[in-house]
Amino acid sequence: MKIGVIGIGFVGLPLAAAFADMGNHVYCLDTDAKKIEGLKNGVIPINEPGLEPLVVKGLEHKLLNFTTDYSETLQNSEIIFIAVGTPPGEDGSADLRFVENVAHEIGSRMTKPLIIADKSTVPVGTAERVRSIIKEELDKRGAAIDFHVISNPEFMAEGRAVKDMMEPSRVVVGTDDSKVAEAVHKLYKPFMMREDRFHSMGVKDAELTKYTGNTDLAMKISFINAIAGLCELLPGTDVENIAAGIGSDPRIGPYFLHPSCGYGGSCFPKDVKALIAFSKKAGLPEPFLRFFQAIEDVNDYQKSVIPRKIIARFGEDLSGKKFALWGLAFKAKTNDMRESAAVTIVEELTKRGAIVAAYDPLAVHEAQNMYLKNNRGVIYEEQDKYKILEGCDALIIATETSEYRSVDLDQAKKLLNNSIIFDGRNLFDIKTLKDAGFEYYAIGRGDQIAYQNIQLTSDRTA
């Protein structure tokens, strides 16, 4: 099939590369000319396992075409996927400006029938809005062209987006037209040869499915983190044992029951906010709204737990203190720092005069150029995770990256001023660390450091 993908980022590029790998001709459109020029030369703008070889293969086989030209893309496509960003607005609702801009461009330039699929995560009613904008633009031109707008939410996790596209857990399509559903089914069929996991439903159902799925997963993370907070008040308890115990129940399952310093990224924080915002507009009763809000509130607090523990251990004034930080991205296998707990950790420590030496081979440039670019209390190391330990008062772990899981404790002990580890991902065995002479502070593992009443700057200014 001939496909157009508009918005070549964390969603659009893996989507396009996977479709091309199945033999489809894909036109990839983005308004960022520098990004498009780089992609034409095989320069991949995001870190995603398995993505680069797919893009290179697509280019070599002339199945991937990168362009900034709407007319070229629309003319050479049967199905258009809108995969632009929908960042949270001031009230937490999804900002649909980029989606609406694409709709205007499509309506003003399309010359033949098209299926337009909302791949971006959007609130209920967006497909109707996109349809209305395209129709308005067609009417302005006096053009009578048949088109369909459908919802086809993405279910790709960063760090495994290619795998999630090549082996989808499900494909959800929202449309009231059976022929359109069958056309989209045909496109995805090669990804599901052993087991068909295609779900056709109403447009609004499909739009709400995406938000419901991400909010449910965020809820599981916030829930286990709340239990972790309880465990830290109960000597002799370990949240990891509790998570294993409840996760063995097939009705609950073990997934996303991993205590941590909080979730981040481009999806969970944004989608929970958006669900809250459009639930308010829909008139959802207050008890339900409080339930959704609690998911976000727990996560916001959880990002501050590691700084609270450090302050409880070292005191309010951290002047002259230096901390090593392993991990800047919000999770392993990505350079994405959106809503990363590491940002909260760095900012809270440097506000109190500390220096943070950070290591993350994938995300250093994002930290320097975007998320921490104005923070002069941070120094960076890209090559050697042990190099930054020298002279530091403690080691902090903020992501679950595999290379952090095996530590040369003897070397770490020699380099650090104090044998102290604050583990925001519960990567290590408590007994091993204790036997090696380390103070080990993790999440919900009974370390009994009294951080609950520590006030942060953000608490006082909220």
Image (spheres, rainbow, N blue to C red):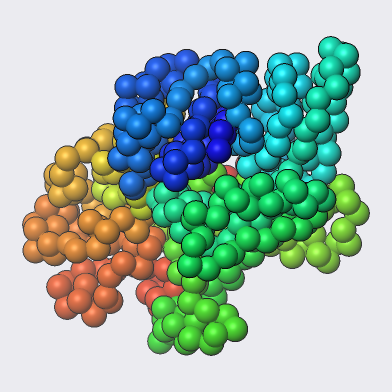
Residue shown at the point (45%, 49%) measured from the top left: 161
Instruction: For the N terminus, give its image quadrant.
Output: top right
Looking at this view, is 29 or 451 the one in front?
29
Q: Position of residue 150 (x, y in %)?
A: 74, 43
- Answer left or right for 158 relative to 323: right
- Answer left or right for 44 relative to 421: right
Above or below, 139 against 357 in this view is: above
Above or below, 25 against 214 in this view is: above
Query: Farthest top residue?
Result: 141
Q: Quadrant of residue 116?
A: top right
Residue shown at the point (44%, 45%) measured from the top left: 22
Q: Position of residue 29 (x, y in %)?
A: 54, 24
Above or below, 319 against 259 in this view is: above
Q: Quadrant of residue 372?
A: top left
Above or below, 234 against 345 in this view is: below
Looking at this view, is 224 or 70 the one in front?
70
Q: Is residue 301 visible?
A: no
Residue shown at the point (57%, 17%) measured from the top left: 72
Instruction: For the C terminus, give its image quadrant.
Output: top right
Q: How many marks?
A: 0
Looking at this view, is 435 or 398 the one in front?
398
Looking at this view, is 117 or 142 the one in front?
142
Q: Position of residue 204 (x, y in %)?
A: 80, 51
Q: Is residue 194 visible?
A: yes
Q: Position of residue 250 (x, y in %)?
A: 54, 85
Residue shown at the point (54%, 44%) measured from the top left: 266
